[in-house]
Amino acid sequence: MYSVVSQALRRRRTSLLWWSIGLAGLAALLAAAYPTVRGNSELDRTFANLPPGVENLLGLGNGNLLTSPAGYLNSQFFANILPVMLLIFAVGMAAWTIAGDEAAGTLELLVANPISRVRVALARLAALLTLLAVLTAVSAATLIALAPVTGLDKGLTAGRLAAATVAAALLALAFAAVAFAVGAATGRRPAALATASALAVAGYAVEGLAHQVPALRPLRAGNPWHWLLAADPLRHGLTWQAWAPPIALTVLLVAASLPRLAHRDLHG
Amino acid sequence: MSAPVIVCDGLTKRFPAVTAVSELSLTVAGGEIVGFLGPNGAGKTTTMRMLIGALRPTAGRCSVLGGSLARDVALRRRVGYLPGDLRVDPAMTGAQLFAWFGRLRGGVDAARVEGLVQRLGLDPSRPFGALSKGNRQKVGIVQALQHDPEVLILDEPSTGLDPLVQREFLALVRQAAERGAAVLFSSHVLPEVERIADRVAIVRAGKLVTESTVGDLLDRTRRHLELRFADPAPAHLFDRVPGVVAADVDGRIATLAVDGPVGPALRAATEAGTLLRVNPAGDDLEDLFVSLYQRSDQSMEVH
């Protein structure tokens, strides 16, 4: 089983390197730009009258001013760019774990070896978690290192920065679990990618509209975007409201799809 | 010969649009090589994919070494499989694949891998994606044989191999059988199966059409020959020669269709004049399929 994990990691190492450079660069750029925003009270006035839905999507609720470190990081990074980037990485890899490998025709030969499909799936999920953890660590470490230099540490501890990064990764994990489950159950990579992406976009839209449209509010309970934005981990840390729902959803989706994977036909 | 190692019993696979395999029963004993013959789309690959556990039978059952490869994961250690459409991560080298699969099977026999690589003339350091079709097939053969399995399930294994490598490969398969391995070997080329198989199972449209020894099958095979003479041959030379079902003599060239042994036809030819050359013409297997299918269709109509 370990050799399947390491094969999956080796396969992604170049991609991991570029993603790490990209995310670290993005975090560094964001931190470097903060000093120009910090003292600009005009920006705060411009953003003061945003509709509550948009304000919520930008993580500017709860009195987070755009020019404050929390408001700046939420609206420019933790509420959108970071989760979306991690989501693209994680969903892409999750769709590969079974469905992508199956479509490439390489899974059949692998599971002719003494290893079950379920073990292959779990080993590759472990590899996915490892890579996601590396990207999370790289992003958080960059911000934490640059925060004292750029003034982003005002009112924000390293722990809070790490918490917000982990929460964004957990949102990515939840949607990756959707891609994994659809791919494992059907063997169709396009279906896996489409379902996860559509739900991610729909979830974001619903979270934005739910402020204006009360009918959409019941959907929030199952929406990873709501879990992330409502928990506001930059302000409150990694509370159970932030980590428990995405982890529970991930476990549920994986557990639900594995029996189907074990018993269905592999596509030739 | 020992007890059956590969068993298909009433094996059936229906897909939404087509019945790929229908009530197929077949056994392969330890030490035996069974050629699995049939045109493309006859159900050979589907049968093998059910044996290996990639597909679940709709009805009937199949077992390998007394168990199901779909359920009994540990059993797969004793089986070598070469898929008909071999695909490997293009960035992975042969050496990496052999090492990885070796670990999954509980240990790499580096000397055996090296021996196989040498015999087939494969460069294991090149990525799979950079290899020619023949060299890719060699990678598939090495991974199927590297753990000296007791069962070999080989789907069109000599696709893309040049004749010398093919001979080496057939020798490897024969050695495996001599050590007691059960081999199921699919092909759509009769001569290859002639050279290696003890028995032949012929499938068409998912059904087993015939199962017999190779010798028996060859007796039934229609051969096409082209004979070249030094001087023009008599037009009616082959008219009453046993086994000749059709003859066309055109000056120095005669084309014949012969059922069964070709000896009498060749004797008649050498007695008639100076025979310069004998060339095989046409695809024996196609004719064999045609005649077998006609027979099976007739028998189906009768019943």
Image: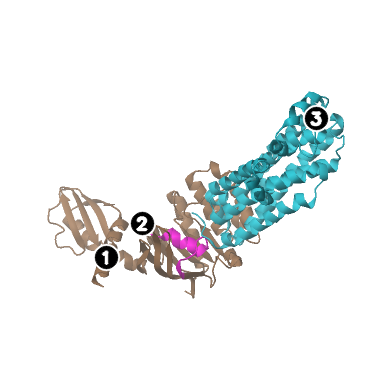
Chain colours: A cyan, B brown
Name the quadrant containing residue A30. top right
Task: Between label 1 and label 3, give the one nearer the viewer.
Answer: 3
Judging depth in this view, the residue of A248 and B55 nearest the camera is A248
| Label 3 secondary element | loop
Compared across the picture, whether A266 is left or right of A145 comes to left
Q: Give the residue at mark 1.
A: B297
In the rendered structure, which disc, 1 or 2, sits on the residue that comes first in sequence?
Answer: 2
Counting from the top left corner in percent of width and height, residue A34 is at: 80, 28
Compared across the picture, whether B225 is left or right of A107 comes to left
Residue B121 appears anywhere in the view:
no
Residue A190 appears anywhere in the view:
yes
Q: Is residue A174 above or below residue B294?
A: above
Chain label for disc 2: B
Q: Give the residue at mark 2.
A: B39
Task: Between label 1 and label 2, give the one nearer the viewer.
Answer: 1
Q: Residue at x 19, y 65 (%)?
A: B242
| Label 2 secondary element | loop
Q: Around disc 1, counting alpha carbons within 10 Å, would you say few (fewer than 14), some (14 to 19), or many (20 or more)? A: few
Chain label for disc 1: B
Q: Are marks 2 and 3 in contact (CB under 8 Å)?
A: no
Judging depth in this view, the residue of A224 and B166 nearest the camera is A224
- Asked if the magenta segment contains residue B108, the reply would be no
CA–CA distance between discs 2 and 3?
A: 72 Å
Counting from the top left corner in percent of width and height, residue A7 is at: 65, 50
Where are the magenta residues, as a range? B42-60
Compared across the picture, whether B241 is left or right of A150 comes to left
Name the residue type under label 1: Asp
Counting from the top left corner in percent of width and height, residue A213 is at: 64, 43
Q: Residue at x 77, y 40 (%)?
A: A138
Q: Which mark is residue A67?
A: 3
Name the quadrant containing residue A50. top right
Name the residue type under label 2: Pro
